[in-house]
Structure formats: structure tokens, C-alpha cells
Amino acid sequence: GMVTPRLVPTSEKGLWLEADGGVWRVLSYVEGVTFNVLEGLEQARAAGDLLARFHRALDGLNHVFVGMRVGVHDTVGHLARLEEAVSTRAWHRLAGEVAPLASAIRAAAQALPALPAVAPRVCHGDLKFNNILFAGATGAESSRPICLVDLDVVGPLSLAFELGDAWRSWCNRAGEDDIQAVLDLDIFRASLDGYTG
């Protein structure tokens, strides 16, 4: 019952085409616009509501996913690789600058509470704000989400990682690529309200 881009089969009825050393696929076109930065509380609320409807639509889906991105949310593995890099590259010209940062990351990770044991559910997997398609660029249309796009990593995931990644992107009014990220708690509250409403 939700709008979504659909795979367009090849002339041989395949869902992809292998050519020029790559795998190619075509999706149906869905009219709309994306935003790199969330614009306001109503847009945040609507985005949260769309995400909740997406999760409800896929709840209980019995499907074997293939081609999953493995290890993206493996915090223990990422910290181990960081530790190895710092300990084996003391000779690097930036080692003096990197060591305090690595130490701060390690301390922050150790201070985090353990995630609750919750079964994975089917999630989008890449909820940057510009993966939400809206009806228009201005006015009420800019707060009317149509669908989620960039569905290549949909699959089982902890809801904590799904929502955490969404809020990391959505709540940063500076934008995804700005190094001076600031968590906007009003955006967080509005999107959580939309999600739980």
C-alpha cells in the first residue's frame, strides 16, 4: 500500500543486466524532490510518520535477503580496527594527532550503554534525509513525503541502528557533510512524534 520505485525487468525478464563490468538495473520513476537538509518541524514529523508506515508495511515480511552489507554497524569490529591502526602505525606522520582522537572515541564507546536485545526487523538501512522523496520543494508539498528511495540495502537490522542513522542525518541542520554537526533536539522530538504517533 505504499508508493515505491519498482524494478523494471530487462527484455529477457531479468531484474538486472550485467554489462561493461558492472551490474545495472532500472527503476520506475517516482515524481518528487529530495532535500539535503531537513527544513522544519512539520517536515520532520512527516518524515517520521513515513518511516513508521514503511516499517509497519514490512513487519513480518518473510524474505531471504541477499547481498547484505555486512559489518556496517559492527561497533566492536570498527573499534578493533581503530586500535590496530593506532598501535601498528606509530611511525605515521599524523600519529600524534590521531592518538588523542582514537582515545576519545574509545572512551566514548566504552561509556555507551549496551543496546537492548531486540530481534532485527526489515529496515531501510540508509536513512539519510535525502533518501526521502517529497511531493514538492515549497509550501505544504515540502512536508508531504511520498516514499523512501535508495532501497538497495533494505534488510534485517536493529531498529536502534536504523533510527540512530536517521537521526544522525535528519537532526543535523548543518547538513550531512558539514564537520560541525549539531543535534537539533526539536527536530528529533518532532520526528519521534511522527514515528510513534
Image (spheres, rainbow, N blue to C red):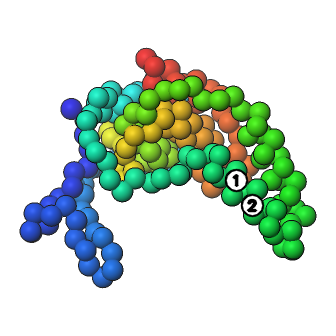
Q: Judge left or right: residue 40 versus residue 2.
A: right
158 over 150 or under it: above or below:
above
In the displayed image of the protein, which residue is found farthest to the right?
96
Residues packed near mark 1 inside 10 Å, few (<14), some (14 to 19) or many (20 plus): few
Camera-side residue of 10 and 86: 86
45 over 109 or under it: above or below:
above
Q: Amino acid at mark 1?
A: Ala
Residue under label 2, please give it. 84
Q: Position of residue 126 (x, y in %)?
A: 46, 47
Q: Position of residue 195 (x, y in %)?
A: 45, 24
Secondary element under disc 1, as helix, strand or loop, is helix
Q: Judge left or right: residue 192 versus residue 31.
A: right
Location of residue 197 (image quadrant): top left
User: Label 2 vs label 1: CA separation?
Assistant: 6 Å
In the displayed image of the protein, which residue is found farthest to the left?
12
Please name the residue shown 33% across and 41% down the image: 147
**Quadrant of the frame with the N terminus:** top left
| Number of marks in picture | 2
Residue under label 1, please give it. 80
Q: Amino acid at mark 2?
A: Glu
Residues packed near mark 2 inside 10 Å, few (<14), some (14 to 19) or many (20 plus): few
